[in-house]
Structures are given as C-alpha cells and as structure tokens.
Image (spheres, coloured by chain):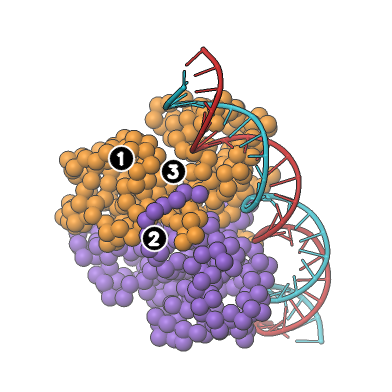
Chain colours: A orange, B purple, C cyan, D red
Amino acid sequence: MLSVTRPQMQREPLDLAASQPSGGALDRRFRSAAAKTLEARDHLFFEGDDKSHAYLVEKGSLCLYKTLPDGRRQIFGFAHAGDFIALDCSDSHSHNARALNLTRLRCLPAHVLKEVGRSDPEAGLQLYTTLSEHLMAARDLLSTVGQRSAAERLAGLLLALARRSERNGFDPWKIQLPMTRLDIADFLSLTIETVSRTFTKFRQDGLIDLTHSTLVTIRNRKALESLAAGERD
Amino acid sequence: MLSVTRPQMQREPLDLAASQPSGGALDRRFRSAAAKTLEARDHLFFEGDDKSHAYLVEKGSLCLYKTLPDGRRQIFGFAHAGDFIALDCSDSHSHNARALNLTRLRCLPAHVLKEVGRSDPEAGLQLYTTLSEHLMAARDLLSTVGQRSAAERLAGLLLALARRSERNGFDPWKIQLPMTRLDIADFLSLTIETVSRTFTKFRQDGLIDLTHSTLVTIRNRKALESLAAGERD
DNA sequence: CGAGTCGTTGATTCTTTTCAAAGCCCGTGG
DNA sequence: CCACGGGCTTTGAAAAGAATCAACGACTCG
C-alpha cells in the first residue's frame, strides 16, 4: 500500500443527496416549470433515451441506476425532495431513473437548462455546485464500494440515512428505510442475502434494533461510526 | 434482479479520460496560466488542502485517489495530457493527486476559474461538459467495480487504454502501461496479486501477449470485448 | 555486486455469493 | 374474520472468487 505522510480529512461518506438548502436561482427556474407525477416503480427515463428534460424532485423519491447487459444493476444514488436529476450535459440519458414511491417532479426542457446556465450567472453557479456535489458523491460511493466490507458499507448507509432523517427534522435514532433490501444491495454492491445477514449481525451485536424490516433504531451509534469510518478493527 | 423491458445502450466503460479535442475556450485560459512541473511520485495536492488552483495537464500523467484512514486506497482516475484536474467547485480538494511520471501542468487560480465560468459563456459550457464527463466516468467506474469480476474489470481497462492509444495515433494493439500493478489494483479495486494472476490468465488463454510487464499486446480483441461488455459467459 | 522495488506464483483463508428453503407480512377474497 | 397467495426477508449450507500470507524471481539503480 501507498504510504502518505499527510493528514487526511474524510468527507462524510455516502451523503446520498447533496441537497443544498433549496431556494437557489436554479430552483426558481424549475419551480415554474411543468409538473409531472410518477407512481411507484414507474420509470422517469431509461439509459439511452434522448434527454428531453432535467428534473427537480418535489415529493417522493427515485433511484438512479445503470445495468449491465446481463441484468446486474448498480444504483448510484437516490433522489429525494429538493434533489435535481439529469443535470449533466449530454444528449441522451446515461442512466435509468425509477420512482420508489409516489413522486412529483418539475420538468425543465434540456435546452432551457443549457440556456439558463449560459445566461443566468447565479443559476449557472448553482448548476456548477450541484454537479460538483454529484461528482463527489459518486466518488465517495466508489471508494465505499471498492474498499469497504459489507458491514462497513451498511453502517455508512444507515448513518447517512440517520443524518438525512435529522436534517429533515425527524428522530435521528429511528430510520424508516425508503428502499427495499434489493435496492440497498444494488446500491452497496452486495446481494440481498448479504445485506440481510449484515442487518441480523448488527441486531445481534446490539448496534441496532429491527422493529420491522424497514424500521431501524440505532442503539450504538459509536460502533456504527467506527465501522463506517473504515479503520479496520 | 430487476427486469427492465427496455433496450439498453451501454456507454464505453472505463473511458479513463473523457478528453475532448483540446482547443476549447477553457483550454485557452489555462494555456496562458502559470506552468508547474512535478517529478514522478510528487503530489500535486492532498485531500483536504485548500484549493488554490485548477489544473490542465500538458505532459505526463497523474493518478487521482482517495484513501481510507487505514490506508486502503481507491484511485478513481488517471489524468493525461489534455485533461483537467480539480475543476469541481469546492474550497478544498476532495481527493489526492500524484504524478506517475515527469509531469507538466498549467495552473489556473481557483477564483479565476470561477470568474471565467461566470463571464465567459463558451468556457463555462466547456467547464460544464467536462464536469459532466467526469461524473459519467465516475459512475461507469462505480458500476464496473461494483458489478464486474476481476477479469471483466481488467479487460475493460485494457480496452480503454487501447482506445486511448489509438486516439493518440499509436498502435491500438500494443499498450504501454503507464501505471504499476498497484495502481491498476487500486483503480479496479483488486489486489496486485489478483491483477497479476488475471494478466497471466489472459496470456495463457491467448487474449494478450506480455512482452514485458508494462507492454501488453492484444491478441484476441473480440474475447476481451465480450468480457468487458459483461454478458456473463 | 548488492539492495530495493516491483511482479509473479503458490497455498491457504476468508468473505461474499449462490442455491435452496422456509418464514413473515399484507392485501385480497371467500 | 380467517384462509390464501405473492412478494419480500431471513436463514442455512455449499461453492466460488478474491484476499492474504509467503516466497521467489526479475529488473533497476547506486
């Protein structure tokens, strides 16, 4: 391994949605755009589709993913209220977007987005910052998936969800999972069995309670944090 | 697994450097900026450092990586001549950058970059496209690392290097590896032993020749491509 | 020539996946 | 109200793939 003699600052890993306090100049453009509603499991778009619009999530949540020809799936993020989707600059979508539950979005035509980026410096800046955050999120997930064990990955996800919970004014100790085991597995690059077993292990070790398969109560945050930090016990 | 009934278009996986034909408006800004030279193994910057500049590589190559507290390392890209580094919009560097060999760069002060993005629409657009490409590269690598086997990952890397070779006017069948086994391992999230064994296996199976550990000749491109595509034999 | 770095190979271990089966939850309909 | 069915989750046993530990070989630079 490479030895680096400099101190390292770790960003919060797995910050699912790098959503800033909404209300930027870009937000305003979206809020006046056409609305759209999706049922659970509906796709907003598929990989390869022409990119007609960029989107702002107003309510609900979606998962963003890619698949290999044989069906293996990699989720690289979940988008929640306040998050932007498909901000990148390409003519066709580079991934799929599917609603996890009832979802409402605002749809800004792609050419308008490009025009806004050019003509409105403030919106352009927010576009730039948001894209940067998406990039950092992707790289963080990459190093999580590439370097961490199953337990470390799941601990990181639970803490990220807890932080999100807290940010939204909910109890940071009780996490209502918005996604299934399969979604978690495909996000963390594990199988559902491994995810399930890791949940069970966390419960047995007293790190969490599992009232229900979708309701996690954190019992030992310290332990989860030290796992997620990746210090290799 | 999720069943999607739509056709899927795969982007080229592992396009290491999404470098456009240089000569954009952004390039011009950099070319007139201060130059800097790094020896092999020198760091350009570390994670957490204040971001003073963004960079354009003029000659040589660097690797961009993150490390966990215990030293595990994830390389998420290599930057070669014509590539931009640290274009993202944050006050401190989110990763490390280290020269693989003798490297020359142009350094544009961060505040100038921001100003250029705001005031020069054409440069702003190139900034936007380049950042988008970096984002797609990160997501591609994520799904490679998350979903593919060791052989599939290495095949993908070799083909990406071959394409780069070709793009630069070199023989697309002979690849001069610019990085060590450790770099490859940390890029593909494998160990050096697994990388080495996979090279050996490719050689034994007649997919490549290994004149030297850093000189790969492609003998069966079809087979490599079908591996890299990820169709699961 | 010798030290050191990098790469290869072998034997073994470990984590995670795969395959298989059973349990649970929840909505539907009798 | 309870039985039935289907999807999701859990659990177990076996297998596979990659990591780890260890040793050796090749090449480079003093």
Q: Determine contact: label 2, label 1, CB under 8 Å.
A: no
Q: Amino acid at mark 2?
A: Gln
Q: Nearer the viewer, residue B94 or C17?
A: C17
Residue lying at 47% horizontally and 60% vertically, measured from the top left: A68
- B122 with respect to B89 (left or right): left
Residue A23, quarter of picture: top left
* Front tag of 3 and 2: 2
Q: Determine contact: label 3, label 2, CB under 8 Å.
A: no
Q: Amino acid at mark 1?
A: Leu
Q: CA distance from mark 2 to mark 1?
A: 21 Å
Is C12 located above or below residue C14 in the figure?
below
Residue lying at 27% horizontally and 68% vertically, measured from the top left: B26
Judging by the rendered image, the residue that carries numbered circle 2 is: B8
Residue lying at 44% horizontally and 30% vertically, measured from the top left: A166
Q: How many marks?
A: 3
Judging by the rendered image, the residue that carries numbered circle 3 is: A16
Judging by the rendered image, the residue that carries numbered circle 1 is: A38
Mark 2 element type: loop
Mark 1 element type: strand
Q: Chain of mark 2?
A: B
Residue A168, quarter of picture: top left
- B173 with respect to B105 (left or right): right
Residue B55 marker: none
**In the rendered image, which quarter contains the N terminus of chain A?**
bottom right
Residue B21 spot, x, y in % from top left = 31, 75
Which is nearer the N-term, disc 3 or disc 1?
3
Is A185 located above or below residue A213 in the figure?
below
Q: Nearer the viewer, residue A73 or D1?
A: D1
- B25 with respect to C7 (left or right): left
